[in-house]
Amino acid sequence: MWKRRFEEINNFEKHLVNNGTIILKFFLNVSKEEQKERFFVLTIARSAINDAKARSFWDDYMSVYEDMFNHTSTKYAPWYIIPADHKWFTRLVVAGIIYTQLKELNLKYPKVSKEQHQELLNAKEILESQK
């Protein structure tokens, strides 16, 4: 089942990329120790007993994540695995990746011809004259 699911994910992402979508996949990797600290805060705040119990499956989750990364990280849609114990660092790394991707798009404001500029001025004049 999983082999087929991974293939479907990759095919869907390839379809998106072929149609001009840039895919950025981030896995915010919190260490087991940091997760424990965060659970202490959450458990006190909301009695999250189910979260605490699920934590006993940590190694199983990590194994499944690794399998997912190995099968769904592609050249056209890679996973970015970001250390997430320190939120400031996580945000910095994610922002850096997004910045780099945006910069590579080489976006520029469109050039407006004299005729288009005049049309815009005429449209502005019409709009300003309306009540």
Image (cartoon, rainbow, N blue to C red):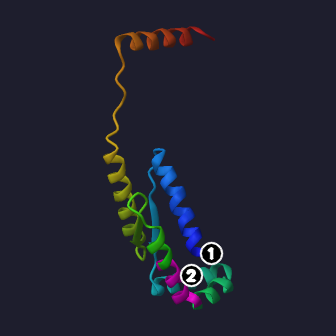
- Viewer-side residue, 18 vs 38: 18
Residue 71 vs 11, above or below: the answer is below
- Check the picture and name the quadrant holding the C terminus: top right
Query: Does residue 39 belong to the magenta stretch?
Result: no
To which residue does mark 2 refer? 41
Residue depicted at x 41% and y 9%: 118
Residue 64 visible? The answer is yes
Residue 39 vs 76, above or below: the answer is below
Residue depicted at x 67% and y 79%: 46
Mark 2 belongs to which amino acid? Val
Res 7 quadrant in image:
bottom right
Expressed as whole percent of the image width and height from the top left, the position of residue 72 reads: 48, 68
Q: Dot 1: within a 10 Å radius of its alpha carbon, few (fewer than 14), some, or many (20 or more) residues? A: few
Residue depicted at x 39% and y 14%: 117
Q: Which residue range is magenta in the image?
A: 57-66
Task: Find numbered disc 1 in the image and state the secondary structure of the residue it sits on.
Answer: loop
Expressed as whole percent of the image width and height from the top left, the position of residue 64 reads: 53, 81
Q: CA distance from mark 2 to mark 1?
A: 37 Å
Res 52 quadrant in image:
bottom right
Expressed as whole percent of the image width and height from the top left, the position of residue 38 reads: 53, 81
Expressed as whole percent of the image width and height from the top left, the position of residue 53 reads: 64, 89
Task: Find numbered disc 2 in the image and state the secondary structure of the residue it sits on.
Answer: helix
Mark 1 belongs to which amino acid? Met
Q: Dot 2: within a 10 Å radius of its alpha carbon, few (fewer than 14), some, or many (20 or more) residues? A: few
Mark identifier at residue 1: 1
Residue depicted at x 52% and y 58%: 11
Q: Is residue 13 left or right of residue 88?
A: right
Query: Does residue 60 belong to the magenta stretch?
Result: yes
- Viewer-side residue, 94 vs 9: 9
Q: Is residue 63 left or right of residue 98?
A: right
